[in-house]
Image (cartoon, helix red, strand yellow):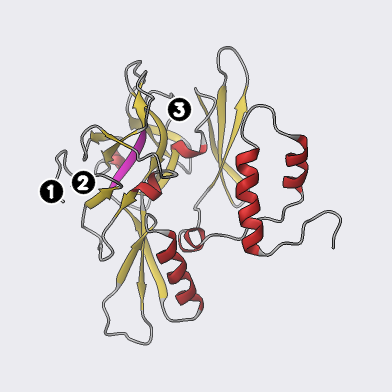
Amino acid sequence: MSTNVLELSGEEAAVLSSLLRLARGGEHPDPVVEALAGRLPPPPPSARDVIFPKAFDVSAEKVGGRGWGFTKITVSREGRELMSYDRSYPSYGEATFSPFKAPDGTWLALASRNYTCTELVRVEDGTWIGGEKPDSLGFCPVELLVPRWRAYRYPTAPDLETQYVTECEDDGRLEKLRRMAEQGKIEFGEEGWMPIGFVAGCIWGDDTSWKVEAFDLSRAHEGILNRIAPWGYASLPPNVSGLREALHYDEYWEPGEHLCGLSQFAWANSSYDKREGE
């Protein structure tokens, strides 16, 4: 056995890595935990990461200073820095940057520089093109997500219609699709992004739970965000890790459909500010 890296199976490394991430939380990390974490091999990519690979690398560095400090966000691709900015809050830096492709092929992102609002930025040159203004009574984001989808086909059955999967699918289905792709039973094709972006957070002072709202992105390329509330004043369920796990699209979802579910809540048409019945 190597004296520097623990020899573990992929599943063992993933489990131990998750436990260590929990143990490393807090302002005073345990030196034993830190030493053990340094000997772990990188965890294997998840099925979600394989089917929906990251378009950009996003890093967040907490910087001290007056008050609670801030976070420096750096966005890069293939080792080349594309843009950076300061977020006026010491946490939720990576979670509040969600890139997506506009219909014209331009890479945009929902991002939160000021912790009280959400803005739009053109990723490849770092130009801020619009969005919300800072507001002391605004909705403070802790997570932003523009869900992605991918098409897949059955190469041995060309008469079957193209099917689609979203990144909000449960881990079990994504793992099944990854195995089918590895076995040559399906082939992944084009990808796209929903015309709706989601935000989890709270209005200042109401942080007993994270609420979930959304943005109509149909005019995002113009720098215009229209906030909507598909489920009214709904909370992010406490038993989920974030928006990807909380949001649900029908198994037979296709591009152009907007019906989206929130765990433990009604299904809603996310393109309108109204609720639909279950």
Closer to the observer: label 2 or label 3?
2
Mark 1 to mark 2 CA distance (whole Å): 7 Å
Dominant secondary structure (helix, strand or loop) of the stretch shown in magenta: strand
Mark 2, secondary structure of its residue: loop
**Which mark identifies residue 113?**
3
Which residue bears the numbered disc 2? 266
- Tell me if residue 2 is in the magenta stretch: no
Q: Amino acid at mark 2?
A: Ala
x and y, in percent, of residue 69 in the image: 57, 19
Residue at x-position 46% and y-position 59%: 52
Mark 1, Cα crowd under 10 Å, few <14 / some 14-19 / many 20+, is: few
Please count the marks in the image.
3
The reply to whether the C-beta atoms of the residues labelled 3 and 1 are less than 8 Å apart is no
Mark 3, Cα crowd under 10 Å, few <14 / some 14-19 / many 20+, is: many
Mark 3 to mark 1 CA distance (whole Å): 36 Å
**Which mark identifies residue 267?**
none
Q: Amino acid at mark 1?
A: Gly
Q: Earlier in the sequence, mark 3 or mark 1?
A: 3
Which residue bears the numbered disc 1? 277
Mark 1, secondary structure of its residue: loop
Residue at x-position 62% and y-position 47%: 19
Q: Where are the magenta residues, as a range?
A: 195-200
The correct choice, above or below, for 137 with respect to 41 in the image is: above
Q: Amino acid at mark 3?
A: Arg
240 relative to 248 in the view: left or right: right
Mark 2 to mark 3 CA distance (whole Å): 31 Å
Q: In this view, which residue lies farthest toward the top?
A: 66
Question: Picture quarter containing residue 84?
Answer: top right
- Residue 89 appears in view: yes
- Residue 110 appears in view: no
x and y, in percent, of residue 44 in the image: 61, 60
Mark 2, Cα crowd under 10 Å, few <14 / some 14-19 / many 20+, is: some
